[in-house]
Image (tube, rainbow, N blue to C red):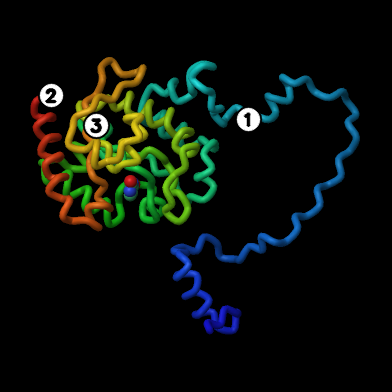
Amino acid sequence: MTDLSLSDPAALLRWYVDAGVDECIGEAPVDRFKAPPPAPARAPAATPAPSIAARAAIAAPAAIPVITPAAFGPHPADTATSVAELKAMVEAFDGCGLKQFASKTVFADGNPSARVMFVGEAPGADEDRQGLPFVGVSGKLLDRMIESIGLSRAESAYITNVVFWRPPGNRAPTDEEIAVCMPFVRRHIELVNPAVLVFVGGLSAKTLLGTTLGITRVRGKWHEYSSPGLAAPVPAMPLFHPAYLLRSPQQKRFAWRDLLSIRERLDQAKA
Ligand code: URA
């Protein structure tokens, strides 16, 4: 039987790796079973309790944008007038639980003036380390896919994701995590206003098309993406995720067809 005591740290480490742990996030261990220190005793209030409005002001620091459902007015992201302003807002935003586990905010890469915008799913470990989307193994394949139709990440493509922080252990982001990022993603697309949108992977396609259909059903067809801040709907093509293509290379021929269709559409769309 494996010795899981500290007398054989290598066996303990192997056990963690087999259980799916792929990263150390702290130098010192944290004892999560330890009772928290007792809260300091509160001095009795000398002044009358603040009004509800005053307490709300204390509970919501001005620097943190508050999520408001559309019915209650515009989201703070809607006030961003440039990609740089939106990036600063996303970096200051503490409303998505994923942020507490991530090392970096992964906002975007490439040229924000590009005519084609790729929207992927969620950052992975490499993206979390570098703070840039699609820089790991699947990102290398995405770069080759982009280059296969005469584009380049640095000059003629712009890349982002539907969430800005890495989900721990590379799990899929939850509906709630996607929902809190969505007003920023929507504004991001409005500010870039690309000629063509590419939804990279099923999660991105489902989220931005508002459909429950899987990627196999929606890829290969042109869709329209609309939002209130866009003057006109943007043609959108869902594409197989490069991580899926690495696992199922026989599907690359379908991705190639979709890439050719994107190239054709870009050639037709006015510059
Ligand atoms: N997969 C994604 O969908 N996005 C990334 O940034 C990296 C991998």
Q: Indicate the secondary structure of the residue bearing disc 1.
A: loop
Q: Is mark 1 within 8 Å of ligand 1?
A: no
Gap between marks 1 and 3, in whole Å? 35 Å
Image position, residue 192 (x, y; %): 29, 27
Gap between marks 2 and 3, in whole Å? 12 Å
Image position, residue 55 (x, y; %): 73, 25
- Mark 2 surroundings: few (<14), some (14-19) or many (≥20) residues within 10 A: few
Question: What label does residue 197 carry, if any?
Answer: 3
Q: Is residue 247 above or below residue 78?
A: below
- Mark 3 surroundings: few (<14), some (14-19) or many (≥20) residues within 10 A: many
Q: Indicate the secondary structure of the residue bearing disc 3.
A: strand
Disc on the earlier residue, 1 or 2: 1
Badge 1 vs badge 2, beta-carbon distance below 8 Å:
no
> In this figure, what is the number of numbered marks?
3
Question: What label does residue 202 carry, if any?
Answer: none
Q: Indicate the secondary structure of the residue bearing disc 2.
A: loop
Tag 2: amino acid: Ala
Give the quadrant of the C terminus. Answer: top left
Residue in view at x 50 percent, y 80 percent: 11
Tag 1: amino acid: Pro
- Mark 1 surroundings: few (<14), some (14-19) or many (≥20) residues within 10 A: few
Gap between marks 1 and 2, in whole Å? 45 Å
Left or right, 263 with reference to 127:
left
Residue in view at x 66 percent, y 60 percent: 32
Q: In front: 28, or 227? A: 227
Kindly identify which residue carries mark 1.
Answer: 61
Residue in view at x 24 percent, y 31 percent: 197
Kindly identify which residue carries mark 2.
Answer: 269
